[in-house]
């Protein structure tokens, strides 16, 4: 019998009111059921929002340093359970253990950052234009935060959102992706155990159409933080407009790595392999395009194809595996369909291109690491997010053209340039349209204390990470204290 998991609402573990459940399976071996989870609906969301609203009235009054103490405890518990969480995460979504350990570590970093922020949460004091008058601006919490997350970083992304939200004095209703409910449950177990009062964090499992929609539409939810696909993000933005919720959207990407003719080619090779095929290409920051200088094109391509063909596909729990499965059949089929699209558009397969289902891979959703050459910027494989192990290679002749090609997309999340020329590097930093730019490093590798997010249709202007995310989870309140004892009219009595 598969283990049965529950929602956490108001500090109690409960089934969906309907009693319905769904299964969570291992993408490396689809026969393995990890557990069953509540298939929740609107009524469960109502319960959770009610609990979060009631908890908010007390939680907002807890001193922020005290809230920070709980964050530190959460971090400590995550450290203690890091290996266990990483293994469960690999089992439910497939990426290799080294990467799931990194995913947990990002959550730990975010917890400790939040803990210290409890003693900061700086406001401003500013001079008043009038005598005997004091002026300041304070950060105040907003209320109930709806948290909706994808499956590719099942620990890091929920922590990026919930830790700053809760540290700032808000309460959360959390709906994780239905492909990764186990990691999300472990996170909430830890948050509960660390001493968060009942109702401060609530988890409601289930589908996007049911649970996600109910959260976004709920009149008593004040803000939504969503990470996922651009299409769903646009729908959320429209729906949230009805109640004028504050909405943070972190959406798709079509990231590129530029390799100039003066680059350290071995370094650039390690970078593109990690960027394109790490997490089986299922990262919002994955390297989906390689923009390669014509002078080093042939040399670099032969190095790249040899290394890509040698990558070892397999169950992420096995130490020899380098690339895990796609998260589910739908995602694997999407990858296969883009291979068809690329071939029909006239691109050439330089590596991979096939579903992998031989031997030990037979029961999983594996796809070979795949490289297309002769890709032109107008092709769909050069424009659309594939979210799988597919790299499109585009030939270029100089830095200016490379930057133009890189920018020729509706997205703008991450970017990378390999060059030894400082002038080209700074031109790229200035002209590339993306939220993150790496020099001589791959498109993946964000650190928890820097702003994370993208421009154009990758988002709506907010940033996660570091100090910047605290702007999303707080409102500014301007406060004036007049100690003159007389009516002083701003802009009138002083001019
Ligand atoms: P998705 O958009 O399918 O789902 C994301 C979440 O939204 C899930 O929890 C899902 O259940 C929920 N959802 C689905 N329909 C909904 C609806 N109508 N209302 C409310 N919620 C709904 O994305 P995914 O497949 O889980 O993740 C992959 C996508 O996420 C890719 O496009 C990737 O680029 C993006 N992503 C972006 C970032 C970033 O920071 N920019 C990070 C990771 C992933
Ligand atoms: Mn799963």
Image: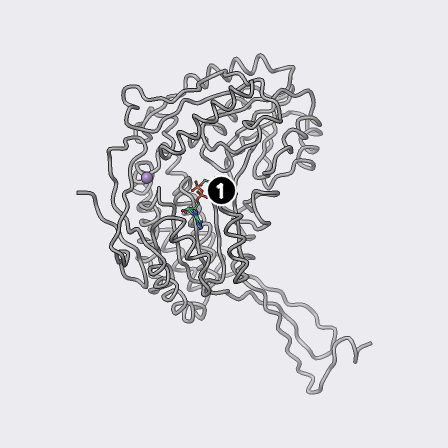
Q: How many marks?
A: 1
In the displayed image of the protein, which residue is found farthest to the bottom? 485
In the displayed image of the protein, which residue is found farthest to the left? 1
Please provide percent x and percent y for residue 187: 35, 50
Residue drawn at 34 percent across, 61 percent down: 43
Judge by depth and name the residue closer to the eye, 84 or 38.
38
Residue drawn at 42 percent across, 41 percent down: 153
Is label 1's Cβ within 8 Å of ligand 1?
A: yes
Quarter of the picture for ligand 2? top left
For residue 253, what is the image quadrant?
A: top right
- Neighbor class of circle 1 (other Cα within 10 Å; few <14, some 14-19, many 20+) is some
Please provide percent x and percent y for residue 238: 54, 53
For residue 88, what is the image quadrant?
A: top left
Judge by depth and name the residue closer to the eye, 228 or 73.
228
Residue drawn at 53 percent across, 29 percent down: 288
Q: Is residue 109 above or below residue 90?
A: below
Helix, strand, or loop for circle 1?
loop
Q: Is residue 467 left or right of residue 419?
A: left
In the displayed image of the protein, which residue is found farthest to the front? 344
Question: On the image, numbered disc 1 is attached to which residue?
Answer: 229
Residue drawn at 46 percent across, 56 percent down: 216
Q: Is residue 45 above or below residue 209?
A: below
Question: Which quadrant of the figure contains the N terminus?
Answer: top left
Q: Is residue 172 left or right of residue 255?
A: left
């Amino acid at each position: 019998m598969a283990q049965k998991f529950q929602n956490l609402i108001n500090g109690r573990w409960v089934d969906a009111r309907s009693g319905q459940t769904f299964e969570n399976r291992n993408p490396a071996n689809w026969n393995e059921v990890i557990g069953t989870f509540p298939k929740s609906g609107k009524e469960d969301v109502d319960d959770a929002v009610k609990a979060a609203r009631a908890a908010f009235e007390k939680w907002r009054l807890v001193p922020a340093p005290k809230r920070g103490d709980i964050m530190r405890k959460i971090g400590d518990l995550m450290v203690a359970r890091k290996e266990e969480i990483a293994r469960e995460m690999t089992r439910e979504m497939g990426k290799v253990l080294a990467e799931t350990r990194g995913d947990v570590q990002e959550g730990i970093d975010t917890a400790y950052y939040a803990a210290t922020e409890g003693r900061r949460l700086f406001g401003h004091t500013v001079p008043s234009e009038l005598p005997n008058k004091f002026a300041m601006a304070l950060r105040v919490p907003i209320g109930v935060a709806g948290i909706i997350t994808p499956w590719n970083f099942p620990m890091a992304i929920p922590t990026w959102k919930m830790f700053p939200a809760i540290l700032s004095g808000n309460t959360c209703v959390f709906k994780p992706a239905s492909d990764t409910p186990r990691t999300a449950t472990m996170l909430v177990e830890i948050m509960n155990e660390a001493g968060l009062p009942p109702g401060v964090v609530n988890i409601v499992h289930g589908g996007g159409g049911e649970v996600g929609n109910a959260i976004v539409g709920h009149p008593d939810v004040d803000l939504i933080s969503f990470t996922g696909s651009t299409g769903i993000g646009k729908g959320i933005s429209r729906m949230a407009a009805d109640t004028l919720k504050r909405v943070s959207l972190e959406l798709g990407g079509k990231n590129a790595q530029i390799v100039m003719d003066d680059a350290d080619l071995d370094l650039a090779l390690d970078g593109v392999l990690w960027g394109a095929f790490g997490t089986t290409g299922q990262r919002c920051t994955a390297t989906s395009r390689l923009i390669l200088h014509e002078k080093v094109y042939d040399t670099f391509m032969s190095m790249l194809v040899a290394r890509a063909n040698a990558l070892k596909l397999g169950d992420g729990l096995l130490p020899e595996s380098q690339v895990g499965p796609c998260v589910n059949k739908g995602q694997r089929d999407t990858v296969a369909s883009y291979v068809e699209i690329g071939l029909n558009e006239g691109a050439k397969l330089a590596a991979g291109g096939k579903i992998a289902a031989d031997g030990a891979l037979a029961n999983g959703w594996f796809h070979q690491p795949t490289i297309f050459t002769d890709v032109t910027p107008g092709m769909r494989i050069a424009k659309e997010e594939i979210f799988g192990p597919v790299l499109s290679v585009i030939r270029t002749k100089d830095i200016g053209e490379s930057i133009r090609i890189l920018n020729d997309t509706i997205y703008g999340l991450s970017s990378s340039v390999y060059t030894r020329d400082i002038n080209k590097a700074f031109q790229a930093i200035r002209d590339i349209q993306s939220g993150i730019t790496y020099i001589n490093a791959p498109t993946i590798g964000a650190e928890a204390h820097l702003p994370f997010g993208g421009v154009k249709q990758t988002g709506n202007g907010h940033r996660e990470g570091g100090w910047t995310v605290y702007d999303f989870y707080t409102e500014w309140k301007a406060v004036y204290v007049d100690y003159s004892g007389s009516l002083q009219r701003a802009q009138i009595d002083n001019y």
